[in-house]
Amino acid sequence: MKSLFGNLSLTIGGTIVLAVILFALFGTLVSGYEPEQMNMKDRFSLPSSDHWLGTDNFGRDLWTRMAVGARVSLTVALCSVAIAVVVGTAVGIVSGYLGGAFDLVTMRIVDVFLGFPPIVLALAIVAALGPGMLNLTLSLAAIFWTEYARVVRSVTLAQREADYVTAAVAIGAGNSRILFVEILPNVVGPIIVLATLGIGTAIIAESGLSFLGFGIEPPTPTWGWTLSYGTRYLRAEPWLSTVAGLAIMITVLGFNLFGDGLRDHLDPRGIARRIRSAPRQ
Amino acid sequence: MSETVLEGIGLSKHFFVGSPFSGGKRRVRAVESVDIAIRRGETVGLVGESGCGKSTIGRLLLRLLDPTEGRIRLLNEDVTGVSGAALRQLRQHMQIVFQDPFASLNPRHRVGDILSAPFRIHGTAPPSEISFRVADLMGRVGLDPAARHKFPHEFSGGQRQRIGIARALALEPDVIVCDEPVSALDVSVQAQIVNLLRDLTEQTGIALLFISHDLAVVENICDRVAVMYLGRIVEFADRDQLFDAPYHPYTKALLQAVPRPDPNQRNRDYSRLEGEVPSPINPPAGCAFHTRCPVAMGRCKAERPLLSDRGESRMVACHLN
């Protein structure tokens, strides 16, 4: 445990992540306002003892709205990364172990997904499926799964040749046992690290899509949409967009620091780092 | 003569390296026309220098690699074409112990899980008995059964090799291929593992194929010894005959190269072989050893000597009489 706290980015990142999660869970309870409760007298107020983060153009309490936005952002990010991890790991581990035609076909499918700029691909999917939280989550999962598939495949390729896998074959283990009992536990380390870093990317992507109006529709107070409509008043009242932008920035920073720290802690040899820093497109 | 448990007949294994873009695929002849038979209860040594195809033969016999040519017989049945579930059933009869005790155990599994896997896969013990059987196995290889909850990295190299041996014993096989089981260990630990293997074979009657490049260890444990050079067996004889009166020039050279811990012989002339092992991609015509053989004749360059019976259960592949 001592080394866990000796790792500065893990400590700071972990604190931020924990704070954001607590904010999402309990933020609306402590503010005393409803997210849609308007008060036209108090429009564009700065932080005060009444409104901890100020108010927006309708005088709605920003603290409350940011807390609801945190809930949306975290839910979408966690669900999309979870789907991407499960799909990507399953495809990657089978592809890496079986090789041959299956590997060839799945990796070309991955290449097709990687051929599109990620945000454009997500926009196209959301445009086809329509807006909404579920569709947004699915479209983000569709752009993230390729990364996990590639990393898991490359780790599996290395593990496949290890003596302990040959030993399992020699004992008479079937393919499913070799894949999921022998190899999978040795793939989990890099995946945990990548997934933590991926949550930050997912929050950015979700905010970006909501900013563009392709994400979750108003009146749900997402961070991206708050940032977007804040820009209409940016010259006179810059506070609104600043709060939303800071919320996104701090949260993503927290997850990235946490992921970096976790990587140094779990994976001192830097397997995940080398794979991640390889050019994506 | 007792029953043959595992036999390779005319085994060849060719690997293909290179791509069509780098001058086409080239054929590596790792193993060429090898006949080898292991009888019940005996220990057969397989020696030769690095890259001569020893390990490949072990894996071919265990059906971990598919032979390019030749047949494999297990308990007098041809198992060359068996695959899938039937092959997994056959694996109960033949097991393997690896060279590297650090790579051969899954780092994420506890020893108890590693040793109970064979019972779970084949159902050879009821679930209620597995824990008892694991403890019994650990006791037989000299490990404390209380250590079953530890991970492999908590053990020393010698202890890990004991775990590997226990795993191979779990299914009560007829034959175990030991692929350089002691060459990654300290000398003092080597002796313990060799003694353990010898005791176990004496108690259980399990046959061993003992692959090694260490002639001293082979002399200690084996009943018969096969010497390999560049994918072929060049001499196959009973241990005492091979070590007392080696026949093939390559066997002689190998035995002369064994270091003797005798201070009175410190100036002994180690007659070394000249040159390098030829490439198995392009092996020499005739006898593969003629490029380095001190007594090569004209005939050796043109005609490949066949492994022939020289009496007293000795087979040699050499034109010299």
Image (cartoon, coloured by chain):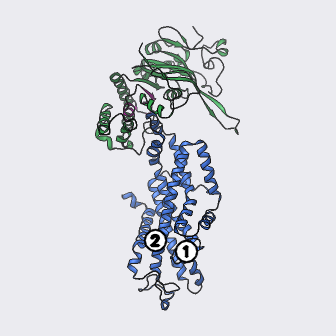
Residue A239 showing in the rendered view: yes
Quadrant in which the C terminus of chain A is drawn? bottom right
Residue B272 showing in the rendered view: no
Chain assignment, label 2: A
Whether residues under marks 1 and 2 lie with C-beta atoms below 8 angstroms apart, the answer is no
**Measured Cα–Cα span from mark 1 to mark 2:** 15 Å
Callout 1 secondary element: loop
Q: Residue B258 colored magenta?
A: no
Q: Residue B164 colored magenta?
A: yes
The magenta segment is B163-186
Q: Residue furthest bottom?
A: A41
Q: Which chain is blue?
A: A
Residue pointed to by mark 1: A217
**Looking at the image, which residue is at 40% across and 27% down?**
B173
Q: Residues within 10 Å of mark 1 (few under 14, many from 20)?
A: some
Q: Which amino acid, mark 2?
A: Arg
Up/down of B45 relative to A43, above or below = above
Callout 2 secondary element: helix
Q: Which chain is green?
A: B
Closer mark to the observer between disc 1 and disc 2:
1
